[in-house]
Amino acid sequence: AQTVTQSQPEMSVQEAETVTLSCTYDTSESDYYLFWYKQPPSRQMILVIRQEAYKQQNATENRFSVNFQKAAKSFSLKISDSQLGDAAMYFCAYRSLETSGSRLTFGEGTQLTVNP
Amino acid sequence: NAGVTQTPKFQVLKTGQSMTLQCAQDMNHNSMYWYRQDPGMGLRLIYYSASEGTTDKGEVPNGYNVSRLNKREFSLRLESAAPSQTSVYFCASSPRVYTEAFFGQGTRLTVV
């Protein structure tokens, strides 16, 4: 079974600065997807970024980018020019393409605080 | 666009009571999921339905049952609620394996 680990329960960053959230995962599969979701206080789960395992190029979405290291099974999220609206719980998730139902497995989450 | 709709948004139950959480999606997605979210544990899969007519257990199925009523609807039932089932419950759906899942707004359930 796959596992996802986020070793930073809490992180903080100053507004306009850069922060990196860590995520590692364990799998024996070669083809899969990885995601970062954001959960603001509203509770809504919002997709931030997606990475296909077969792609070597790191995904980027505006101020959000990932550092995907397949051999190391690491998938960190970098937020540049942090804004107050980035404050939220962030979840890393793994999607199996081989397991029935292709369900998502989530990490424990990292609570990000953005200080003005 | 409604997306994934869950009802109710909040619920308080007494120990031993039963209830059904409703979930419907209007995106014609094949797969649907029920997760529970607890502090420090992320989201854990309770049950899922890979396609209409099929359901399977996830990581934490004990104390729950599900029904995939049709392609749109996937309900979660607590037959005899326990305080350990106090949590936030999320329904999600996904069109195919190569995309993300789309989530409802969650149900905060408290069992006293």
Image (cartoon, rainbow, N blue to C red):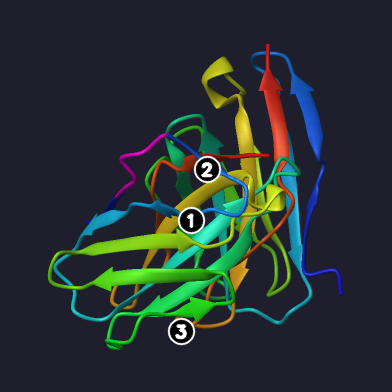
Q: In the rendered structure, the residue with mark 3 lies on which chain?
A: B
- Residue linked to disc 1: A18
Pick the front one: B43 or A12: A12
Name which residue type carries label 1. Thr
Q: In the rendered structure, the residue with mark 1 lies on which chain?
A: A
In the rendered view, tell whether residue B86 sits above or below residue B62: above
Q: Position of residue A36 (x, y in %)?
A: 48, 62
In the image, taking residue A69 as reference, residue B23 lies left or right, namely right
User: In this view of the protein, can residue B59 be seen by the observer?
Assistant: yes
Magenta residues, start to end: A5-9
Rendered image: mark on residue B83? none
Q: Residue at x 71, y 33 (%)?
A: B108
The residue mark sitting in front, 3 or 1, is 1
Rendered image: mark on residue B98? 3
Residues at discs 3 and 1 in contact (Cβ within 8 Å): no
Rendered image: mark on residue A13? 2
Mark-to-mark CA distance, 2 and 3: 33 Å
